Amino acid sequence: MVRVELGRGRLLMEVVEVIKGIVDSAYFDFSPSQMSLNAIDSNGVKVSLVLRSNNFNSYECLFEQTMGINLDRMYNVFQLCGHDDSLTLESVRDYAVKLIFTSPERDTIATIELDLATIELDLVSDFLWTDFVIKDTEPYATVRMPSSGLESMCKMLIIASDTIIISVTKEQVKFSIICDTGAIDYTFVQRTVPADKPEDETVIQMHETMEPVSMMVDLEYLKVFTKATLLSKTVTLKFCPDDNLVVVYQIPRFGFLKFCMPKE
């Protein structure tokens, strides 16, 4: 039996909106300590979610349980969730999940039962289950920057190219595209800001080597990741030795939403 309550139900709606841009369906795993998700698409792009139990309004899970959920259907159900509505999520034996949206202002309660999904894994049958997990490897370079800045940059450059080269030095991170009309560079320079506005800071750390790091990645995927800007004011880019880019959005008080994609 799983029964959890979120004071702001739209938090989960915002999470689902991002993840459904990568996979159609996914397994949500519930344990006594957290709600989590690990998924991979046919191109090897991974997504990982952790929401820790201690910051839910209430969280009841006596033993581990997994729910397969069609994310498009779940997102459509969330259209019934008002901006300030609370969400209660309950397992209904082994065949459904119940979503209850409660709005104190309107004094209304909406209850929906959503059938659990049997997820077809044909498209990712070449991957082992361990491949779904984003590994914590020491990166060559790490960039923490304003999430709104990354989002704006992706929206501007996606109209000209579907791939992007990200270059990192100890002073700056540069996003570059080559298109029919020439080349475009978009640069964020490392800078510090007043202590009360850490979300406006761009911080670059070079690991292992001080040599510049460069990687070409899929810009369309990166733009999908930036939908998580609603969840966090900052985003961290990790350039890993296995030629993967890991993109992390910390969800204040709860956990994180993390993505990993191979270089082009």
Image: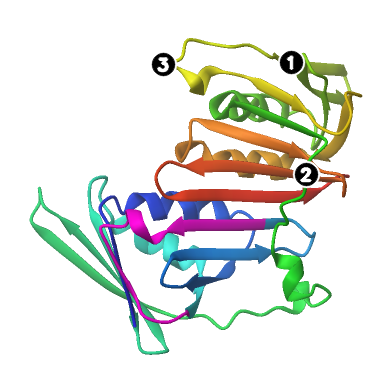
Q: Which mark is residue 196?
A: 3
The stretch in magenta equals: 47-64
Q: Which mark is residue 138?
A: 2
Say if 135 sits above or below 68 in the image.
above
Q: Decide if residue 203 is on the left or right side of residue 186.
A: left
Q: Quadrant of the C terminus?
A: top right
- Label 2 sits on a secondary structure element that is loop
Q: Residue at x 87, y 35 (%)?
A: 215
User: How far apart are labels 2 and 3 at the CA level?
Assistant: 29 Å
The amino acid sitting under disc 3 is: Asp
- Residue under label 1, please give it: 187
Graded by Cα atoms within 10 Å as few (under 14), some (14 to 19) or many (20 or more), the crowding at tag 1 reads some
Q: Decide if residue 177 is on the left or right side of residue 114.
A: right
User: How far apart are labels 1 and 2 at the CA level?
Assistant: 24 Å
Say if 87 sits above or below 235 in the image.
below
Task: Looking at the picture, tell me which residue is in the foreground, 220 or 264.
Answer: 264
The earlier-in-sequence mark between 1 and 2 is: 2
Graded by Cα atoms within 10 Å as few (under 14), some (14 to 19) or many (20 or more), the crowding at tag 2 reads few
The amino acid sitting under disc 2 is: Glu
Say if 257 sits above or below 235 in the image.
below
Residue 25 image position (x, y, % from top left): 57, 69
- Label 3 sits on a secondary structure element that is loop
